[in-house]
Image (cartoon, helix red, strand yellow):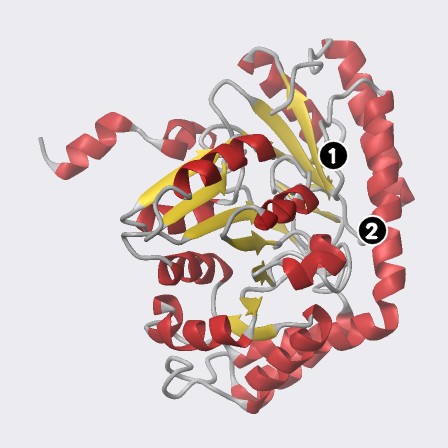
């Protein structure tokens, strides 16, 4: 059997859903990034993109980005940042973020790869990684690179984490790295940071928080807030609130100096393009004037959407963020009918999430509220969900993840 034959026989991951290409996977949404776009020629209300604060669609942002491209092109600067890819703009953006998070900062050319590299650079085969089972795939892939001991603890189960720390403490030659998300991307809940940090009184470990969905959405210091001073390593991508590729890692100077010279994805990968850097700089400037207003609208929309769904009988779990999961327990045929009617009859587009993103046998619809949505978007969406729940008798009162 050839390697390709083996891969075809396994049909791992999303290969099992290839028949839905263009519908549930690789769908094409067309038009400007707005709350209403087009899907297969039909206007739909979109709840499936990351632009929490409505920045990327702002005409002033697009104009500023256009001016940068006119002056420098889209491929400037060239090479890795270590050798030829550093600019005053990169250093200025690090300075601006440093003022927000109150830690030293290093930009990452890609959020996903950067997070993997951070984890990989921190540990050797003698060390131990302990991670929440709900962390993002980028952290999981960083863990997979580790050649030493690695253990997961049940989602947000601090006592389970404590047991792993008890065990790791019996190996004095090992350092321990604990990984959590600030906001969990499927559930929408937050890490129990107060309780996790209290364990530092009894155990010696380094805590890394990936706050991709929390930074700027919850505030300048993300979902961790004033606890950021106690978090050893804080990471965020720009992909959520800033709605563009890239990210940063923040920590004390010793860690940042280490990362500056030891992150393989940065050393051997092209630097963050100037267009991305300038875009984030401009967006941060806008937020100095409009951040409170944009966040207030985001959270009003979030509350309206989530309360309306709960009133219609939907189980949205323990979310405390704009991420709004609807937990479904029904036959695939019923779920497919439900989603088809949402999109084609009522013009509501949201993502379907299944294994391997979440455990086997579970299905969620994932809606993300943004500051781009308005009252009409939310009311039309809630009406569609209410009608379909009554018509199809969706059994959505299942125990959530």
Q: In this image, 13 relative to 212: left or right?
A: left
Disc 1 residue crowd, few under 14, some 14–19, many 20+, Cα 10 Å? many
Farthest left residue in view: 1
Which structural element holds mark 2?
helix
Pointer 1 residue: 347
| In this picture, residue 125 sits left or right of residue 130 | left
Expressed as whole percent of the image width and height from the top left, the position of residue 138 reads 46, 50
Locate residue 332, reporting x and y percent.
54, 15
Would you identify the image quadrant in which residue 71 lies? bottom right
Q: Position of residue 91 (x, y in %)?
A: 57, 85
Residue bearing the label numbered 2? 298
Q: Nearer the viewer, residue 115 or 246?
A: 115
The residue located at (47%, 86%) in the rendering is 86
Name the disc covering residue 22, or none.
Answer: none
* Relative height, residue 88 to residue 347 (above, below): below
Q: In screen coordinates, is 135 left or right of 306?
A: left
């Amino acid at each position: 059997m050839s390697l390709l034959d083996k891969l075809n026989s396994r049909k791992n991951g999303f290969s099992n859903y290839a028949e839905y290409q263009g519908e549930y996977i690789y769908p094409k949404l067309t038009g400007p990034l707005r709350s209403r776009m087009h899907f297969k020629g039909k206007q739909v209300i979109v709840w499936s993109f990351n632009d929490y604060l409505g920045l990327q669609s702002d005409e002033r942002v697009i104009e500023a980005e256009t001016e940068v491209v006119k002056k420098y092109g889209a491929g400037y600067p060239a090479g890795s940042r270590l050798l030829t890819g550093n600019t005053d703009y990169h250093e200025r953006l690090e300075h601006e973020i440093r003022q927000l998070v109150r830690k030293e900062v290093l930009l990452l050319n890609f959020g996903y790869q950067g997070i993997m590299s951070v984890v990989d650079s921190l540990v050797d085969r003698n060390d131990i990684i302990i991670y929440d089972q709900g962390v993002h795939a980028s952290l999981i892939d960083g863990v997979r690179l580790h050649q030493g001991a690695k253990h997961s603890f049940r989602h947000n189960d601090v006592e389970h984490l404590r047991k792993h720390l008890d065990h790791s403490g019996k190996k004095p030659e090992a350092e321990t790295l604990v990984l959590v998300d600030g906001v969990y991307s499927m559930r929408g809940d937050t890490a129990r940071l107060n309780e996790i940090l209290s364990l530092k009184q009894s155990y010696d470990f380094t805590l890394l928080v990936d706050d991709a969905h929390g930074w700027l959405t919850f505030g300048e210091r993300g979902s961790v807030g004033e606890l950021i001073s106690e978090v050893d390593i804080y990471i965020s991508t720009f992909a959520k609130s800033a709605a563009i590729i890239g990210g940063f890692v923040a920590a004390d100077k010793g860690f940042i100096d280490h990362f500056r010279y030891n992150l393989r994805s940065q050393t051997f990968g092209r630097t963050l393009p100037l267009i991305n850097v300038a875009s984030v700089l401009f967006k941060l400037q806008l937020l100095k004037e409009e951040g409170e207003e944009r966040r207030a609208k985001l959270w009003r929309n979030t509350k309206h959407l989530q309360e309306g769904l709960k009133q219609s009988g939907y189980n949205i779990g323990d979310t405390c963020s704009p991420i709004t999961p609807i937990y479904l327990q029904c036959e695939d045929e019923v779920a497919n009918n439900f989603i088809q009617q949402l999109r084609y009859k009522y013009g509501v587009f949201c993502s379907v999430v299944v294994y391997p993103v979440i455990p086997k046998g579970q299905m969620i619809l994932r809606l993300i509220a943004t500051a781009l949505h308005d009252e009409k978007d939310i009311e039309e969406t809630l009406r569609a969900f209410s009608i379909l729940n009554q018509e199809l008798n969706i059994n959505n009162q299942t125990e959530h993840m």
